[in-house]
Image (cartoon, helix red, strand yellow):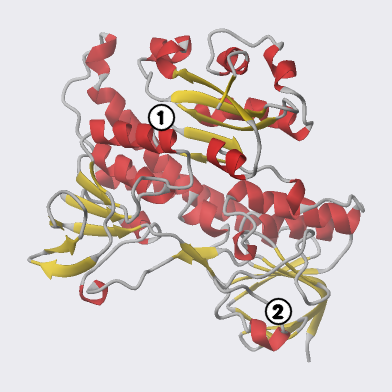
């Protein structure tokens, strides 16, 4: 006999637990299902542990540069076992916190095991059958392992298995020149590894404007990271205790050898073993669950939230999914995914903070654009910190004066770019931002200056 609940939530990533607590607080009986570690990608092998590792890498990098600030730090040595232990402690606290939260929330029952649909709103977990009038799928995603010649004959790492590394790779080869690959590449270069980043495209982080990509490339190259672009004919093979990668690049050696391989070529949703066909739940060609503007699937009473719906790939978009669903169900707010402005960051050092459209996207959309740009060498806070690489860039509509997007590649850029968020949601003209007085000396104080120097592009 099935156990009947008001709601079933599959997965405990960023949106699932918050939704469970909200529904339970409204008096509903909620079943939460988790097959592995509580907290999802962000807590266990994404945001929290990687940014903890990045903090250690930054400390090592700054210690090596200490002489530039008149400080004698002496020889710098990185203890990777201690680095990993610190990461494990920080990540573990978050993981344990989510589990304790769910198990201690009234009206919430935790079921551990792999969930599979047996019908539109019935789910099997081990020997138990659960049933509810509402089901929320929050199963997240995992690293994509591409089809690559020879990959079955070598050992490789992903962002998940990198969490177990407590040693320093002699030469780390990273396949993938986008966000995950660049963060790990710079991180391990600062720990002391030789690093080569291999990208199939003509430039790094291809979704960004060319000037952003070029500046990031310059920053990484200056730290001694080898960048190989236009690598079209990738193949790997064992070589001694390590491996080699055949590149087929337009320039440079056709082959590189390394001790370890990290695959950072994208992610896939965890939807292939949920029994979605038994429920009739639709997916797209990549396996993402198709949803409408309120995150409802094609099956009444079933929602998909978080990374598995393909409508966002970040912790903050997953949490916003929860806010949309909870607001519409409990408060009748009429919230929609399409109201959301794209915002994210690349957490290299310096970081790239991004919001809204790129200049390229705006022009492709047929907009007449104005662009304001300022190098970080002309930002006082950056110069004072000795971290003046990168630039600030803001894009606006020439006719409406509405801010369309921004990119801040520089110290504090991930924080400073968000000072434009409310103005963009309110559709204020950039002139309103230009008139605001901001704190000196900060990075964001230069935003009014940048919008005041807008030019047609």
Q: Is residue 241 left or right of residue 127?
A: left
Give 129 or 97, whichever is nearer the viewer. 129
Q: Earlier in the sequence, mark 1 or mark 2?
A: 2
- List the residue tagged with mark 2: 281
Task: Give x and y (percent) for residue 389.
Answer: 37, 23
Quarter of the image that includes the C terminus: top right
Quarter of the image that includes the N terminus: bottom right
Q: Are marks 1 and 2 in contact (CB under 8 Å)?
A: no
Q: Which mark is residue 326?
A: none
User: In the rendered image of this protein, does residue 155 appear above or below residue 447?
Assistant: below
> From this viewpoint, which residue is outermost toward the left?
240
**Total numbered labels placed on residues in the image:** 2
Q: Residue, x 22% and y 14% (percent of image)? A: 67
Give 344 or 158, whichever is nearer the viewer. 344
- List the residue tagged with mark 1: 350
Q: Residue, x 22% and y 46% (percent of image)? A: 195
């Amino acid at each position: 006999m099935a156990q009947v609940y008001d709601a079933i939530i599959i997965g405990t990533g960023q949106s699932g637990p918050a939704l469970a607590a909200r529904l339970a607080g409204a008096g509903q009986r909620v079943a939460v299902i988790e097959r592995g570690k509580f907290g999802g990608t962000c807590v266990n092998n994404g945001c929290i542990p990687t940014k903890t590792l990045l903090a250690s890498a930054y400390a090592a990098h700054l210690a090596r540069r200490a002489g530039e600030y008149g400080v004698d730090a002496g020889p710098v040595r990185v203890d990777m076992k201690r680095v990993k232990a610190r990461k494990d402690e920080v990540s573990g606290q978050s993981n344990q916190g989510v589990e304790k939260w769910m198990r201690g929330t009234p009206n919430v029952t935790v079921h551990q095991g792999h969930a599979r649909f047996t019908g539109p709103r019935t789910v099997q977990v081990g020997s138990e059958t659960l049933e509810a009038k509402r089901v929320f799928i929050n199963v997240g995603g995992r690293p994509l392992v591409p089809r690559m010649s020879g990959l079955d004959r070598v050992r490789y790492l992903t962002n998940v298995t990198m969490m177990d590394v407590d040693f320093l790779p002699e030469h780390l080869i990273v396949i993938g020149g986008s966000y995950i690959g660049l963060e790990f590449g710079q991180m391990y270069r600062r720990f002391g590894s030789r690093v080569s980043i291999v990208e199939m495209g003509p430039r790094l982080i291809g979704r960004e404007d060319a000037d952003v990509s070029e500046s990031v490339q310059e920053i990484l190259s200056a730290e001694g990271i080898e960048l190989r672009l236009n690598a079209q004919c990738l193949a790997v093979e064992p070589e001694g205790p390590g491996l080699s990668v055949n590149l087929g690049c337009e320039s440079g050696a056709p082959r590189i050898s390394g001790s370890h391989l990290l695959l950072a070529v994208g992610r896939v949703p965890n939807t292939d073993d949920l029994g979605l066909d038994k429920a009739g739940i639709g997916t797209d060609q990549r396996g993402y669950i198709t949803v409408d503007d309120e995150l409802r699937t094609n099956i009444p009473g079933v929602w998909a939230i978080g990374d598995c719906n393909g409508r966002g790939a970040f912790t903050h978009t997953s949490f916003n999914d929860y806010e949309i669903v909870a607001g519409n169900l409990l408060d009748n707010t009429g919230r929609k995914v399409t109201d959301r402005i794209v915002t994210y960051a690349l957490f290299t050092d310096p970081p790239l903070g991004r919001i809204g459209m790129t200049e390229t996207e705006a022009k492709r959309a047929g907009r007449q654009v104005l662009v304001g740009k300022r190098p970080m060498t002309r930002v006082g806070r950056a110069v004072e910190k000795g971290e003046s690489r990168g630039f600030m860039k803001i894009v606006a509509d020439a006719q409406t004066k509405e801010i369309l997007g921004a990119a801040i590649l520089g110290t504090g850029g991930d924080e400073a770019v968000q000072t434009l968020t409310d103005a963009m949601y309110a559709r204020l003209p950039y002139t309103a931002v230009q008139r605001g007085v901001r704190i000196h000396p900060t990075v964001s104080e230069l935003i009014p200056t940048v919008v005041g120097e807008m030019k047609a592009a």
